[in-house]
Amino acid sequence: MMSAKPTTHRGFLLSGMKEAKLYESVFGVKPKTFEDLFNDVIDAGKCTFCGGCFAACPFSVIGFENELPKLVGACYQCELCWYTCPRTVFDYDEMDKAIFGRVRDKEERLGIYIAAYAARSKIKDVLNVAQDGGIATTLLAYSLDKGIVDSVVASKRNVDVWRPWQRDYETKGDLWRPWPNVVFDSKELIEASGTKYSTSPVTVGLRYAVEDCASSNVGVVGTPCEIQTVRKMQYSYKACSKLGSRVKFVVGLFCMESFWYKELVKFIEWKGVDINTVRKFAITKGKFIAYAEDKELFSVPLDEIKACVRGSCHVCRDFTAEHADISVGSVGSPDGWSTVLIRTKVGEELFKGACEAGYIEFKPIEEVKPGLKSVLKLSEGKKERQKEVKEQG
């Protein structure tokens, strides 16, 4: 059920061979090009659809097709796409040192964090639409209201999609397809609230915020792979620092896996359900569940929907967004609450400010059940799955 691969546009690749040979003659090594990215990541089934390659390309010659990147012009051998991608090289120890000033201990199996809480938004409008405790949305709202950032990048559903590589809009109509949006007013965040189980190329929104909206301080929320891309932009000298330097904070979302959007739609239709009638999806206790306004439409074991999972998720070891400033998810807290891991001083100040301003209520994670043991169980399971896939080659 996997989506079709994009075209490689080898004519565009070949047009840059002279530049590549010149680079090799001067520096003694071949530059990393889009062709390398295609061979190492896209064709290998490892692409996360984070949008990093598109966002990093200064020549705007990368577009998307079938939820994957494709070349739409001549590659200029700048290497930014390859070095920004989270699936080419990502050194956990080096990133730990860059963000936290040290490498995690073996006992820190959820990554480095300062404190852990169960928390819930105190904003009624957020709770009405939130998947769980509404913490990610509330943190973004607080940061906008208090001027900590001038914009945030959040994924919305059912929006017109601007396709710069084609200079047109793809009109909305896919109710559950997520796409990154730049938000300037906290009231707009309600539309972006709730979990989306298909991938949104978040860094496309980051590029738009910086280049088109001239944002100097941007808040970003995303899944672990998307957070890795943003962190590479911030801390890897060969990645797209122009965008990374504008990021004020990153909020990471717990994520076990993500689905191909078109395959998810096909599955739902196969279950006899019109996706336009679905108002909420949830993954809980090993089940994938779809809800209408007031009833459950269907509930199936996760194994039944595994054919819709992106292959890139199988090579990912990060469940809790271990390099975010704050990590948020439902696992570990009671219904209607979110588990929050405060990882950095930036995250600590953001969370503390939101609580003191009356945006959030919280309690120590030790006071709730099932607590961090359930988070650790899923985190260890994802790491073990990645290890098995790696050993199998």
Image (cartoon, helix red, strand yellow):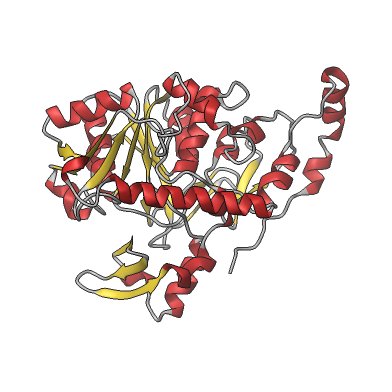
Q: Residue 362 location in percent, x, y?
A: 15, 38
Instruction: Tell me the quadrant of the picture where the N terminus can be found.
Output: bottom right
Left of 44 or right of it: where is 14? Answer: right
Left of 199 or right of it: where is 187? Answer: left
Q: How many marks?
A: 0
Identity of the residue furthest to the bottom in this view: 272
Is residue 17 in view from this perspective?
yes
Residue drawn at 46 percent across, 55 percent down: 257
Is residue 244 in view from this perspective?
no
Q: Residue 164 location in percent, x, y?
A: 56, 43
Residue drawn at 42 percent across, 62 percent down: 174
Q: Residue 334 location in percent, x, y?
A: 20, 53
Residue 2 placement: quadrant: bottom right
Residue 310 placement: quadrant: bottom right
Left of 362 or right of it: where is 230? Answer: right
Identity of the residue furthest to the front in this view: 107
Near-viewer residue (65 or 213)? 65
Q: Residue 389 location in percent, x, y?
A: 61, 54
Residue drawn at 74 percent across, 31 percent down: 77
Say if 24 sits above or below 7 in the image.
above
Near-viewer residue (190 or 89)? 89
Residue drawn at 71 percent across, 54 percent down: 7
Left of 261 or right of it: where is 274? Answer: left
Say if 259 sits above or below 391 in the image.
below
